[in-house]
Amino acid sequence: MALYLANLDERTRALMLEEVDYDTARQQLHISPYLSGQGQRDYEELLRAAIESGDEETLAEKLNEHRRIARTAHRRKPDGGYTIVTVPHNAAQIIAESEFNRYYIRAVCRRALEDGIDELVVYRAKPVGTPRPESEELVESTVAPAELLRDLREHTGDEAPQMGIPGGPNSGISVRLP
């Protein structure tokens, strides 16, 4: 099911691309461990294409092609070391939703800052069957765009943002302009 991104328009897309450039210039573009070697090579181009003229579903479709998703991945164990895990069947959707939404949120933060808006509204961009309580607490709250942008730039990919936005894989949490 597609994310409802309330402020996804040409201006937001341009800012999303600038945020990809920001990460690329700092060599911090998140490459999911669920991507195969081919997926890792193609990822930035596919992400840019989805931002320019598609959405997270477009990105997921492309990631599912040409063996871009690995079958297994390494996962850090809590007590140290690594283990090998089977990649989830919906890995392409998880990656696409998470990363597209992160860049969307960063772009909306930039828009708010450029327009002098000092609060963004947290909302559920995707209905979920069993919402996490911590995600539900965030819905309809407001956040400062500068703080959220800083948090997401510092915590890329698998690192959970300190502010809890977005709320992790499949949370459906996003932000919009008031």
Image: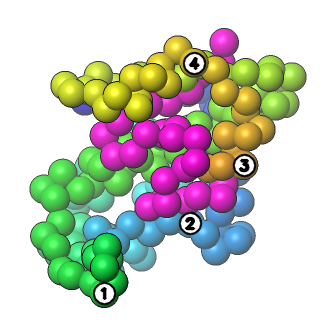
At x 58%, y 41%, the residue is 163
Find the distance from the CA under tag 3 to the CA under tag 1: 31 Å
Residue 139 part of the magenta-drawn span: no
- On residue 96, which mark appears? none
Q: Are marks 4 and 3 in contact (CB under 8 Å)?
A: no
Where is mark 2, residue-wise? Answer: 29
Q: Quadrant of the N terminus?
A: top left
Name the N-terminal-most of marks 1 and 4: 1
Whether 107 is drawn above or below 133: the answer is below
Residue situated in front as seen by the camera: 105 or 10 = 105
Residue range highlighted in magenta? 153-178
Total marks shown come to 4
Packing grade of label 3 (10 A; few <14, some 14-19, many >=20) is few
User: Mark 4 or mark 3: which comes first in sequence?
Assistant: 4
Q: Residue at x 66, y 12 (%)?
A: 178
Q: Residue at x 16, y 73 (%)?
A: 85
Query: What whole-number distance in Å separates the C-alpha atoms at marks 2 and 3?
Result: 15 Å
Q: Which residue is mark 4?
A: 141
Badge 4: residue crowd in 10 Å (few <14, some 14–19, many ≥20): few
Looking at numbered disc 1 in the image, what kind of residue is underneath it? Gly
Instruction: Give the farthest residue toward the bottom.
Output: 81
Please report contact status of discs 3 and 1: CB closer than 8 Å, yes or no: no
The quarter of the displayed image where residue 114 is located? top right
Please tell me which residue lies in front, 64 or 90. 90
Q: CA distance from mark 4 to mark 3?
A: 18 Å
Q: In the picture shown, does residue 57 fall above or below 43?
A: above
Q: Report which residue position mark 3 lands on.
A: 150
Q: Position of residue 166 (x, y in %)?
A: 48, 39
Circle 2 — which element?
loop
Q: Which residue is mark 1?
A: 81
Sequence-first disc among 4 and 2 = 2
Q: Amino acid at mark 3?
A: Arg
